[in-house]
Image (cartoon, grey):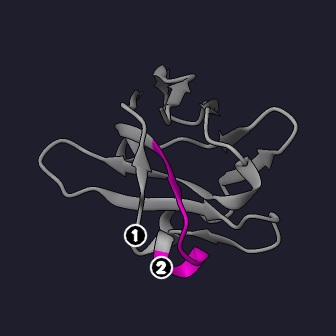
């Protein structure tokens, strides 16, 4: 059974940093594109970042470029989202995701597996 388990969410102030981690029970981990999506209250889920199987191709939504960094660790089957200079508009439930499509399609929403999400709240 595939499981994606997120951790690291919480309540922070604007300008602070958080690190989200996702432990994936998918095998082989290297066969999957990985990424993060988020959903703010009253809004649709949106893609935040995606990383290809090899880590060579990475996508970010414009609003997080230069502030967020996605990475993956094949040995630990984990994907991490480093979030710096957080803003109130980053407040959302963040979901780890995995997919078997190409990275661009995955970033566009073609996801095979979802985690249950972790809440990030940024106060002003």
Q: Describe residue 92's horizontal placement relative to residue 112 as left or right.
A: left
Whether residue 124 is visible here, answered yes or no, is: no
Lower position in the chain sequence, tag 2 or tag 1:
2
**What residue range appears in magenta?**
96-105
Position of residue 77 relative to residue 105, above or below, is above
Q: Quadrant of the C terminus?
A: top left
Residue 18 at x, y percent in the picture: 62, 30
Picture quarter containing residue 90? top left
| Identity of the residue drawn at 81% across and 32% down | 76
Give the residue at mark 2: 105
Q: Kindly give the residue lying farthest to the left in the view shown.
A: 42
Give the residue at mark 1: 110
| Identity of the residue drawn at 49% across and 70% down | 106
Residue 12 at x, y percent in the picture: 49, 22
Q: Is residue 104 magenta?
A: yes
Position of residue 98 relative to residue 75, above or below, is below
Secondary structure under the numbered disc 2 in the rendered image: helix
Q: Do the residues under discs 2 and 1 have CB atoms within 8 angstroms?
A: yes
Picture quarter containing residue 49? bottom right
| Identity of the residue drawn at 54% across and 41% down | 86
Q: Describe residue 42's horizontal placement relative to residue 100 as left or right.
A: left
């Amino acid at each position: 059974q595939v499981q994606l388990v997120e951790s690291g969410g919480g309540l922070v102030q604007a300008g602070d940093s958080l690190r989200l981690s996702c432990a994936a029970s998918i095998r082989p981990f290297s066969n999957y594109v990985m990424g993060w999506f988020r959903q703010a209250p009253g809004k649709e889920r949106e893609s935040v970042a995606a990383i290809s199987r090899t880590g060579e191709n990475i996508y970010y939504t414009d609003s997080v470029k230069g502030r967020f960094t996605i990475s993956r660790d094949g040995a630990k089957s984990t994907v991490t989202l480093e979030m710096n200079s957080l803003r109130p508009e980053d407040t959302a439930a963040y979901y780890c995701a995995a997919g078997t499509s190409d990275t661009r399609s995955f970033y566009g929403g073609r996801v095979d597996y979802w985690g249950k999400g972790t809440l990030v709240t940024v106060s002003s």
